[in-house]
Image (cartoon, rainbow, N blue to C red):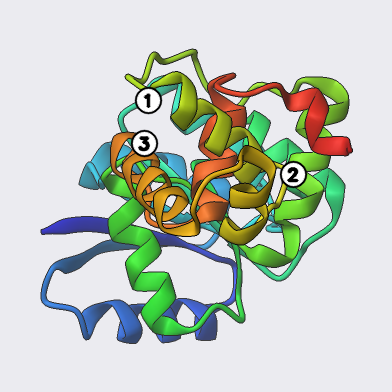
Amino acid sequence: MVRVAICDDQIIVCEGLQRILDSDPEIEVVGVAYDGAEACQLVEKTDPDLILMDLKMPHMNGIVATRRIRMQNPEVHILVLTTYDDDEWLFDAIRSGAAGYLLKDTPPSELIAAIKGTVSGKAFVDPSVTSKLLSEVSKTGLTLGSPTHFSLSDREREVLQLIVEGLSNADIAERLFLAEGTVRNYTSSVFRKLGVSDRTQAAVLALRHGLVDSGSTSK
């Protein structure tokens, strides 16, 4: 059972999210907060595994709340759910310790999958903002987490590098002079070792932990 808290200043949004999450038997909504300060208090009272965090709220916004919660309760995952895809909000949220960044038009099934995946350690970033995040990492070396060592072979790292650069399996096969089926096998192995389920998650995790040369993402 994944224990989830919701933080959003719009009551109707909170009620809608609760209905969506209540439809899944593996998720329990343990509380609702209507601003960042309430979210900080709610964490202490309910000990959630994850908080769905809005950003623009009165009294204390989601950026400040995320930073405080992660400092005091680093085991709590913060998944941003917002209408804002502005660069400033995105980068500040990730720097503050958010594990993922989704927009509010995310389909319910994908939201539920993101919640479960985030708790298991995967990274979820809305496709519409992924390119901005990868570009920022490339330009500034934005650090999203502490370095971690993964048991990737040299060839798997080559494949991962090209995934980060946005190449398809067919393009990777051509670049590395491999059969496309072989590239698919390497890609599956990379996903398994990183604990991710798609190319976006793999790219974000690779850049987060310095598994590839981030400078090449701008090519």
- Which percent across, then down, holds residue 55? 67, 55
Residue 124 in sight from this viewpoint:
no
- Which percent across, then down, holds residue 186? 39, 43
Q: Nearer the viewer, mark 2 or mark 3?
A: 3
* Amino acid, disc 3: Leu
Mark identifier at residue 158: none
Disc 2 or 1, which lies upstream in sequence?
Answer: 1
Q: Is 169 rendered above or below residue 141?
A: below
Q: Nearer the viewer, mark 3 or mark 1?
A: 3
Disc 2 or 3, which lies upstream in sequence?
Answer: 2
Per the image, the residue denoted by label 3 is 194
Q: Quadrant of the C terminus?
A: top right
* Amino acid, disc 2: Leu
Q: Is 122 rendered above or below residue 170?
A: above
Question: Cα distance, mark 2 to mark 1?
Answer: 22 Å
Q: Secondary structure at mark 3?
A: helix
Question: Cα distance, mark 2 to mark 3?
Answer: 19 Å
Mark identifier at residue 133: 2
- Which percent across, then down, holds residue 44? 29, 36
Q: Secondary structure at mark 1?
A: loop
Q: Is residue 42 left or right of residue 33?
A: left
Per the image, the residue denoted by label 1 is 74
